[in-house]
Amino acid sequence: MKIRSRLTLQFASIFALILLLFSLVVYYFTSLYRQDDFYSRISRRALIVARHILEADEVNEQQRHRNQISYYQELPYEAVQIIDATGNVIFAEGEGELGFTPARAAKVLKKGALAYEQGVRQVVAIRYQDNQGDFVVLASSVDAYSLRKLQHLKVILVVGFLGSMVVVLGAGWAFSKQAMRPVIKVISQVQKISANDLHLRLSNAEGTDEVSDLAKTFNKMLDRLELAFEMQSTFVSNASHELRTPLTAMIGELEVALMKPRETEEYHRVLQSTLEDARMLTELSNGLLQIAQASLDPSKIKKTELRFDELVWMARDQALKRQPNARIDIDFANFPDEEDRLVVRGNEALLLIAVVNVLENAIKFSPNEQAVVGHIIVKNHQVMLQVRDRGLGIAEEDLKHVFVPFFRADNVRSIMGHGIGLPLAERILKLHQGSISVNSQLNQGTDVTIKLPQAYLIIPSYH
């Protein structure tokens, strides 16, 4: 069932329940008031009958005349009886079954009065004391006029209820259409967005209602999807370029070498060049495998407690083995009072890869003989490494792509590399609930900051 239909039915059901309760209350209290009012009229009639019949020998002529006038003002379908103490009916007038039983007679004598219904007839019995003894006076009547009015009221309420439901269903359908209009608009706009139109956004995201919140949330999701598609496109483009370059070079060298017989030295040169290209492909393959490893479920990675400063020094030694001419200066920006604050929890091999990649990146893009500086900082329950170089820097528009595998900025195309280091470092740090950030300006250098939580603050997470 569609939301519009559900809203209409819910709206109509609530209104129907309220209207039904209202109609029942009106009918019940009207019926109750009619009954009580008519019992009062019958009670007065019983007193009039008693005075006219039983007190005729006790009052003067003028009072007897007034009692007689009152007596002849009968009620519709009236029936009256007077019963003496022995149970004999000494006076009766009118037709109708009064249903006066000995049990009811006992109640009248005990309580002094009794009101009850006999079919549609209402009966009032009162005990009346006279100089001749105790009597029970019965008066009854049928409130035909009020009962007809009550029946008409019932018809009016039923017809009014049904007519109101028709109006409510129509109004509810129109109301639900108006209420669902923003949602329908969102659906219409979403249906127009495809993989080729991820730049489109929902228009009604400026309000403060729930639909606007939904549109804002959807727009944020589109932002993430657009960035993911862009990163994927960049990854595929750069990865294919990086993989194709050494393969093309290898095929070209081998085809040229096989065109005609060559000297031994020429074959040696071709094999040497092919070997270098093959090693480059191996490095690319290893980088892809490391990225895949860094995307594993965190719960499956073995972690131990490590001294972060010792890890950084190990990474420095490895980086210097690969780049003997480089300079890497590591120091403490603030040495903690407690050495336990330098302890992190993680996988030593993976964290070592991340730190080495950051250091090697800084070396690679620094001018010759300029030192790479690393500061170890302990702050806000985190251990950080800030690596700074004074190299080429990264353009602002390229910063958002630095964590895309195989992405390389235009100004560093001439420098040997594959664009794997920073993406790999980012994934490794995410596995350890850490983070990495890059700040850079063209021709002024780059600052890369690694952050890891201290070991005693780590909360296991498997997301």
Image (cartoon, helix red, strand yellow):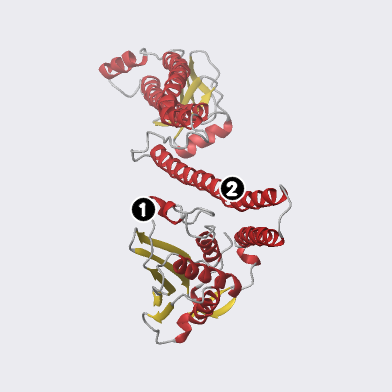
Q: Which residue is painted at 47% across and 21% down in the image?
A: 169
User: Label 2, on which residue?
Assistant: 240
Nearer to the camera, 428 or 169: 428
Instruction: Indicate the position of residue 334 as horizontal and vertical percent values.
Output: 36, 81
Screen quadrant of the C terminus: bottom right
Residue 43 — which label? none
- Within 10 Å of disc 2 (Cα), the crowding (few <14, some 14-19, many 20+) is few
Quarter holding residue 300? bottom right
Asked whether the residues under the numbered discs 2 and 1 touch, taking CB atoms below 8 Å apart as contact, a structural biologist would say no
Query: Viewer-proximal residue, 428 or 45?
Result: 428
Q: Which residue is mark 1?
A: 396
- Dot 2: what SS? helix
Q: Nearer the viewer, residue 266 or 453?
A: 266
Say whether residue 299 is left or right of residue 399: right
Q: Is residue 191 above or below residue 416?
A: above
Give whichever of discs 2 and 1 has the lower sequence position.
2
Q: Residue 52 in the image: x percent, y percent?
A: 37, 19
Looking at the image, can residue 31 be seen? no
Q: Amino acid at mark 2?
A: Ser
Q: Locate residue 420, reporting x and y percent.
A: 54, 59
Against 116, is 321 above or below? below
Where residue 314 appears, x then y in whole percent? 54, 79
Residue 445, compared with residue 260, is above or below; it is below
157 to 218, vertically: above or below: above
Residue type highlighted by circle 1: Glu
